[in-house]
Every structure is written in C-alpha cells, then in structure tokens.
Image (spheres, grey):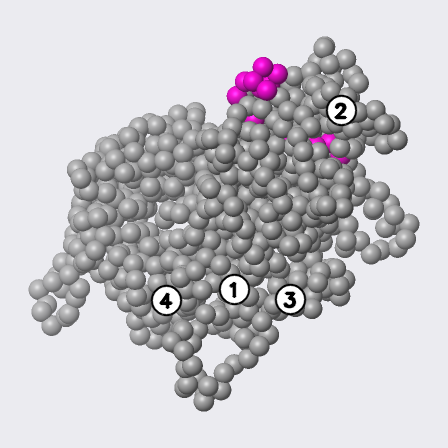
Amino acid sequence: MAASVIETCHVACCANRTPNVVSWGRGGIIAFGTCNSVALYDPQERRVVGLLNGHNGRVNAVQWVHRKDNAPECHLISGGSDNRLILWEAQHGKFIRSVECKGHSGPVCAVDTIYMEDSKILVASSASDSTIRLWLCSRNKEAECLHNVSFGSGFMMDVSLALLPGTRVPILACGGDDSRVHLYVQANRQLQKVMSLQGHEDWVRGVEWTSTGTELLLASCSQDSLIRVWRLCAKSGSDTRTEDDHTIIKMKEDVFEVKDREIISAFAVSLETVLAGHENWVYGVHWQPQVYKGGELQQPLRLLSASMDKTMIIWAPEEESGVWVEQVRVGEVGGNTLGFYGCQMSPDGAMIVAHAFHGALHLWCKDQDKEREWRPGVVISGHFNAVQDLSWDPEGEFIITVGSDQTTRLFTPWKKQDSKQTTWHEISRPQIHGYDMQCLSMVGRFQFVSGADEKVLRVFQAPRNFVENFANISGTSKEKLLTSSDTTNLPEGASTPALGLSNKAVFQGDLVPKTAEEEGQFSSISDQYQESNFHPLILTDPPPEDHLLQNTLWPEVQKLYGHGFEVFCLASDSTRTVVASACKASKAEHAAVLLWSTSMWRQLQRLQYHTLTVTQMAFSPDAQLLLAVSRDRTWSLWRRNLPTPESAEPLFSLCAHTGKDTAIHSRIIWSCDWSPDSRYFVTSSRDKKVIVWGPCSPESPEDSVPPPEIKPCSSILDVGDSATAVAFCPVLCSDNSFLLTVGLESGRILLFRWSPGQDGAAGSDWISCGETDSSQSHSLAVKQLRWRPRAGRAGVESSETSGRSDSERKLQEESSWLQLASAGADHSVKIFNVNKQAL
C-alpha cells in the first residue's frame, strides 16, 4: 500500500502495569510496553514515533541494548507474557523483529543485555517459571540458550548485566523474593554463583550495575523501603597486608576469584551506603547515563529511585564528605492512586520519568533558571485497558473515549506557541468511575451520555473551567465557545464524593476559602469531611496526570434509569434531541431499545423487536431513521413519525427488518453505519461479511411513492476476518463514490470505495483503497471507528491565519485530508490522516 494514503497522526496509549516496562534510550527515545506492543515515544516531539507489534501476550519488560560509546541504540529487547523474548534491530530507521528467544515456560518479567566481543548480544532474562536464562544472540539471527538457573519455588524480580573491570567476563546480579542479591559470573558459557549479598529485609525489587571505569557500583532496592549501593573492585595482591592492621575501620569485604584467559583475578564486594528516604516499597533504581566530559565518557554518581510512596528521589554523594544524600524529590501528594513502578533518566540527566500503577507516565524536567527545581512536563497518556467506544464532538475539534479502565478521556490537538507541530493530548478526564465503561454518545458541543457495566445512564456537562482551558489549548476564541453553550449556570468544575460514583458540581461559591471562624464551627457531621478536591486551573499546556485525576472532572447532571441489565450501546441523532440506549439481553423483554428526550431527560419510548443484545445503533444523518443491529444476527429499521397534536414528541415505528430467513449474516452483527445521504446503511459481522443495504428513501423528497423494499445494494464483501467495526466517511470521494472503513478482530483497518449502481454480481462495486500496515494496526480487535464529521485535520486548519490567497491554498490542501479515529482492545486510541487525493 502506498504510504501516502494512511498516515498515523496520533497514538494515545500508556505503559503496562508492571515494573521494568520502560527504558530510555541514549538516542532520546523512550521505549515502553503497551498491551502486546512496544511503543517508541519521542519526549521532545511529544509523539509516538513507532509501534512494534510481535508479542501475543502483554509486554512486561523492555530494555535498550546500550552501546559502549553512548551512541543511539540499534537494538532493543522485549519480554512478554507469551513466554518469549524478541530482539528488535534498527534497519533504515525502522525497528524490525530480528531474533526470538523461546524457552521460558512462564511470563518473562525482567531482562537485561550487553554487547560482547564480535558484536554478539548477551541477554539475561528472569521469568515466573522461577528460572533465569542466559542467551547469546549472534549476527546470523540465531539465539542460543547458554544456561538456565532454577530457583526452586523462588522468583527473581530483576536482573542486571555488566562486564567485570579489566576483563571480558560478564557478571549478573539478580534480586528476588529471598531478600538477597545473588551474583553470578559467566565461566565456560555457564553461570557460576560467586556470592549472595545480604542486608535487605524484604523482597529485592530492582538491581542495576554501573561502571566507573575501574570499579562497578550496584544499586539494589527493596520492599523494606531501603536502597543499598554496593562497590565491586579488583583486588591486587598488595591489598592483603593492611588486613592485619586493626587500627583501620573497614567495611566487611567479600572476595571471589575469576579466571579469564588463564589469568586469575580477585574481586572484592563491599557495602558502599544505605539510602533511607522512601516511606514505602522501592520498585526501581536507575543510574544516570554516562556523559561526555572533555572528550571522554564519565559516569556521574547520581542515582534515581522510584517508590510506591508516589515519589522519585535523585541521590548523590556530597563533594566534601562523600556521604550520599537526597538531592531532589519529586512526586505527588494526595489522590486515590498507588505509587510508581519504575523510573528512567534522560541521556543528559535533565529529565526524569516514572511510570505509575495505573500505567500513566509522569515526566519532570529540570528548570533551566533555578538550580534544584524540577517541574512536571507534558507527556503521553492513554487508557490502561481496552478502549470500548469513542466519539468526535459535533465540530470535529476533539474526541472523547471510554474504556474498561473505568475512565472517560478527552483528547484534543495542542499547537504550542513556538512550534509548527500540532500534537494531540489528553486535556480532561470527565469521568472516573467504579464500573468498566462501555459506550458514550455526544449530545451537544459540551455534553455527553455514557454507559458502563451498570443499569444507569449518566449525563455529563462540561464545566466553565474546561471550556476556558479548551479555548486556551486549542486556540479557539473563549467568547465564541461560551456563547455556543448555555453558560449562565455552568459550574466551575466537579469533584467526586469519597464514597460515591456521581461527580458533584462545584460552583463559584464553593471555592471561597473559609475563614478561621467558619472552619471551627461545623453545622453538620458531613461538613467535617470536605468533599471538594477541585481547584480551578488556568491551563495553557496539557495538564499532568495528577491534575487530570482531580481537577478536570465534569459534573454529572442526570441519571437515566430503565434498563434491567448492563448498558451496552448508545446513539444520538444529529438534531441532538433523542438518545437511544440498549443493554445486554438474553431475552426479548430486555433487548428493547429505549429512547430518551434530551430536553427533559425522560424516557419517550421502548422499541421492541430483537431477542438478544443490540450490539450497535445508528441514527441516519437526516435524523429520520434509527438502525439497530443485534446478536440475534438481524437488523431493524425504525422511522420517525410526524408529530401529531396528541404527541409533540417524536415517536418511532418499525418500518423494516430482517428475519431468520432473510438475514444474510450468519453470525453476530457487530457494527453498522449510515451513508452521508441517509439512503444506504452498512452492516458488518463476525461471519467476515460487510453488506450495504438500501435504498431507504426515494430519490427526490417530492415522490409520494412509498419507500422501496430495503435489500442488499452491494455484493457481499468478504474481509477475511471478523469485522468488528465499520464506518461510512461523511465526505464523498471525487467520483461520488462512498468511502468506507472496516476494522477487523486482528486489529487491521481496511479502506474501501463503494459505488451504488455498479454491477454488484461481479463484485466490481467494491474497490480496495488501502489498509494499515503492521506498525499502524492495532494488536487486538478494533472496537470502534469514527470519521471526523468534516474534512480537514483537527487543530491544523484553525491555526492558518496567513495571507488570503495563501490561506485559500492551504484550505484547499487541508480539505484533501480526512481524519479517522479508532479505538482498540489493545488499550490504544489512534487517529489516522487519510489522503483523499491518494485514493
């Protein structure tokens, strides 16, 4: 496929919820595991520059293979829950799968690697099969398992490899659930245990070597909240005399011998320091990368640690005394989240990143002006579980997504003042729920309805603080936005009660700080427990994770009751007056579609036809027809009746449906959508078939003839895999054919042109226009596809304010682009730019 048809504009994702899953390369790229893929993220450009799909299980460990000269890496290793390790190699600017290491019988949880002579790569991996394996990956794309160490019923949490000073002998450190750090050296291609370092009082969670030229330093961290730094140095024969001198106080040393090419060398290990400062389990330690000073590589003695107490600390020895002290501490206060799983430092030491229990990345940057000050930076974010549904706002300025991680998130383009590049970011998290989210539908510019694994629908309205911040970040005029929505009684923000699921509105009056007198007098018990954690923020940059969690909620304005089981899908019409909802059902009585009025938020009607769960619904663009598709393999079409004096509210009646005998689909129908002219609709099913049906309205509105019979208008398109999502593009192609996109269970997204009136029998009515390649596709099923409601790319056309003819040319150029948003079970939301000219 020509690369010019589909290009990836944005990927929203987050790190997997395991330690060891993030690695910052010397070339500046952060690699992290997200679901079954490895994402390559550029923190300077603030976007994902590559996705590596190859694992069939969750990626648990990622590690760049650092080069001796500190140049950008060309190898990356990842280990996953599919019990495999994959070595990726850079070729022509892209990483491709080079070698696979198979042999573990359990998920790989930690991995480390170094280059050996003749550019072979030595890899150590630990897995939950209680073993550590040593692999040698050679140039000819083969991996050989050199040795396998079993720990019986114990587990090793982390591994680290280094070369002993002055030799070519690798030494492996591993820390585990026996509270010890075990050291192994490689001799005759086998691992030989040389010693166990004791001192930690709980599981050792992380170990990392660094070389200072003549010595090695090893940092280990543990669930006892302490970090220990050990020093390993070569021991010469002259060192032994001082041992008889009892006046010198020395740390206890453990000595071991190693044979390298017939020369026997002795090495001593001693405890350098114990660092106490964290108040909870320490999950990760990371040495600052080597830097060039005066033309040679030097190792700065700075150590970064991350803990479950939600802080990261940078430790370094004081110049005068050599005592290790805490230099910088960053992190979070409050909130209902757990702490950090691991940390990494940028090649120049000016940025640090931690990944949290909920997968979010937290980035801090060193302040250029103030010496020891660090401030939060803008970093990628996304769902940490399957994304179930997404919707564009009616103007096509932002998208809202919901997922099984119980959150609703809002992404919008941000054009920084001094940069040409427009990047997408999460700027609000309207809903943080106690149930897995399933579906949502926009019912206005700043209002949406969402459904979760509960029987209630919830309606949310944007607060004033969001509208103002959205205007700042997207560059839209604030006045224009505030006049477009009813702003007289907009609350400032929202907060969640300690034990509730409903976001409560916070109004201007609630934000006035109380006087000391008022603080002293509680009028009721509940006043002692302040509900509002909301603080209005003036944002010009996308907010960091702790603000998203606390200060960007939307107030819930309504709950809708009526379903007997968990809500499954939602749809709203183009006039924003009616919302349709359906829930999980195994009987006809529960499979009814409920219609709600958006003005009164009351139930208008129950539409009864299907016998099993309605999987998706769609209103036609002219708002006259409602289509529902179901697990019972049929679809039903409902027409809006003309309002009568008795009932002013619009009511719908069944006008067409397929039955058991006329249903062409033989499996569950997953998805449906309407053509922009409301004449045709498309259905896609688990039976791999995609079919366009119609016509649903006469050619011209004056015709008084009844609408013709609705039957398949297209040949049956077999897409070769379960078709889980389908969408018609609202913009026609240049030859007036329709553009459709189909999402598959395998994660691929296909583009087709379909022309009505072509001879369907020969199958010539479908023309394939392209598909996503392996690096663009989702790694699991596509859950939802939505085209931007108008042509152009969000965030690009609004910022063009150059000369008239110039801007006309740019508008012309811009209208040749279309944007498609997709939600995947692989936790990611992707936005693609589709070039209409290249179709």
Q: Nearer the viewer, residue 13 or 631?
A: 631
First along the sequence among labels 3 and 4: 4
Which secondary structure, mark 3? Answer: loop
From mark 2 to mark 4, how far is it between C-alphas? 73 Å
The answer to whether residue 337 is seen in the rendering is: yes
Q: Are marks 1 and 2 in contact (CB under 8 Å)?
A: no
From mark 1 to mark 4, how far is it between C-alphas? 45 Å
Type of amino acid at the residue the image marks with label 2: Pro
The picture places residue 574, in percent across and down from the top left corner, at 72, 44
| Dot label at residue 695 | 2
Residue stretch in magenta: 659-676
Query: Majority secondary structure of the magenta segment?
Result: loop
Task: Return the residue at label 4.
Answer: 316
From mark 1 to mark 2, how far is it between C-alphas? 46 Å
Type of amino acid at the residue the image marks with label 3: Leu
Task: Please name which of the two marks, 3 or 4, marks the residue nearer to the observer.
Answer: 3
The answer to whether residue 343 is seen in the rendering is: no
Q: Residues within 10 Å of mark 2 (few under 14, many from 20)?
A: some
Task: Please name which of the two marks, 1 or 4, marks the residue nearer to the observer.
Answer: 1
Q: Residues within 10 Å of mark 3 (few under 14, many from 20)?
A: many
Q: Is residue 218 magenta?
A: no
| Dot label at residue 490 | 3
Task: Return the residue at label 1.
Answer: 504
Residue drawn at (20%, 36%) of the image: 150
Residue drawn at (56%, 56%) of the image: 558
Q: Nearer the viewer, residue 118 or 84?
A: 84
Q: Residues within 10 Å of mark 1 (few under 14, many from 20)?
A: many
First along the sequence among labels 1 and 4: 4
From mark 2 to mark 3, how far is it between C-alphas? 44 Å
